[in-house]
Image (cartoon, grey):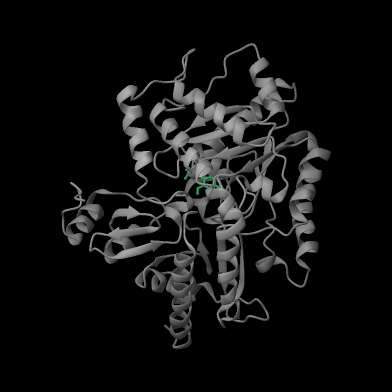
Amino acid sequence: MTFLTSNRPTAEWQASDAAHHIHPFTDHSALAKRGVRVITRGDGVYLWDSDGNRIMDGMAGLWCVQVGYGRKELAEASYRAMQELPYYNTFFQSTTPAAVTLSEKLAEITPAPFKHTFFANSGSEANDTIAKMVRYYWNLQGKPEKKTIISRDYAYHGVTMAAASLSGLQPMHPQFDLPLPGFEHADAPYWFAEGGDMDPEEFGLKAARSLEDKIQALGADKVAAFIGEPVQGAGGVIVPPDSYWPEIQRICRKYDILLIADEVICGFGRTGNWWGSETFGIEPDFMTLAKGLSSGYLPISAVMVGKRVGDAMTAADEEFVHGFTYSGHPVAAAVALENIRILQEEGIIDRGRDEIGPYMQSRLRTLADHPLVGEVRGVGLVAAIELVEDKAARKPYDPSRGAGVICRDHSIANGLIMRAVRDAMVLSPPLVITKEQVDEMVGIVHKALDLTAKDLASGN
Ligand SMILES: Cc1ncc(COP(=O)(O)O)c(C=O)c1O
């Protein structure tokens, strides 16, 4: 297959990119020195770069390509939809068959209380929308003072002003004078880093109760909602102890606080079930969906609005003054529908839960004996391997050693895209990965760990 745009030498792409392209989450001076990696094509779990190297994508892009690359059905769905109706909006008493059918489908596949969907184009936009809906809901209830949304340390909810305020990754705030007022953060259930001598379950309760402490400090009449990813993804695949979510649920009910499950990573099978909320027994008032909704083939996201807020909003005798030009875009909606059909008809999510997820988790746990590995954690098809200087003490390397980055670079040089979050090595491959490919992935991780250990020992 030829690609119109992929016929320039790598150095030319790199020079032009450095001259004209501002990248997300990138140190541009470092990138210009090193030269950007140019990805030209994908098939299944593999990508190819502009030098023709094949690389396994252990991250499914940005945790999103559930069905793998190169699915012709998705390309054809978008081609058909574009020919029929390339664009129309859902404002001002209009809709399109694709937007209606997708909202119907999402009501069918999400947990029972969800009947209503609001469409946006990214996880960030969806979370910003939820922040507005939360305010609107409490205003409709005659409780306008209930405004603060509590999130957590290490949370990632996106980059728009509200979504970045909800995020709890500290470097995301100072450049932009964030968080905005009305956004607070409680503790994360990050036992490995912060659990000290506590038993994980005991620590899970302690982390959950930091929410209660926050609510009591702010006053329950001021707190509108709590948001959490079932498993915190970009914060380092923080899998909560079993004690955590039931306690959060109890606290939200006790203080009459809306519960938002950000399913942008966890949704569409990542944790072994359709929803992270199912895996952890969460009963949220909102769910944020994006990424796996279209397997990343086109930008689309959705806010699932639960009964309480949905009833209030649809009964309000006034306009909901919010929406995006591309809310419910007919081509993106058609691709999302086709993607969901593939996930359902090919049993991809059941296979993730019953077969390939447990296989990947057990194979990765064989790395736990490696001298560099402090913990292997994960659920379904998402995992982290935490690197440490001292296994028994769970003592991390000094960040200046860059252990995670060294390991990531060895991994990529050996044919596997693995991400470093601090020194947690993160994997989240396409759900269609095979057992042989899991073996290949674990083999490369092992090699990268050995090479990293060697570098760190020699002081590199
Ligand atoms: C849990 C979570 N929420 C929200 C977002 C933001 O999504 P987007 O990058 O589509 O705005 C992300 C992105 O990684 C995410 O992981």
Q: Nearer the viewer, residue 203 or 101?
A: 101
Looking at the image, the residue that sits furthest to the right is: 254
Name which quarter of the figure residue 303 lies in.
top right
Locate the C terminus and report the quarter of the image it occupies: bottom left
Give the x, y percent position of residue 243: 78, 56
Give the x, y percent position of residue 236: 57, 60
Is residue 46 left or right of 208 when viewed as pictured? Answer: left
Q: Nearer the viewer, residue 289 or 96?
A: 96
The answer, for residue 35, to whether it is visible in the render is yes
Up the image or down, 422 lies above or below 176; here it is below
Point 64% across, 25% down: residue:
136
Looking at the image, the residue that sits furthest to the bottom is: 458
The answer, for residue 37, to whether it is visible in the render is no
Is residue 384 left or right of 39 when viewed as pictured? Answer: right
Is residue 150 left or right of 427 when viewed as pictured? Answer: right
Give the x, y percent position of residue 407: 45, 73
Give the x, y percent position of residue 282: 72, 44
Up the image or down, 225 lies above or below 318; here it is below
Name which quarter of the figure residue 34 lies in.
bottom left
Q: Nearer the viewer, residue 392 or 279?
A: 279
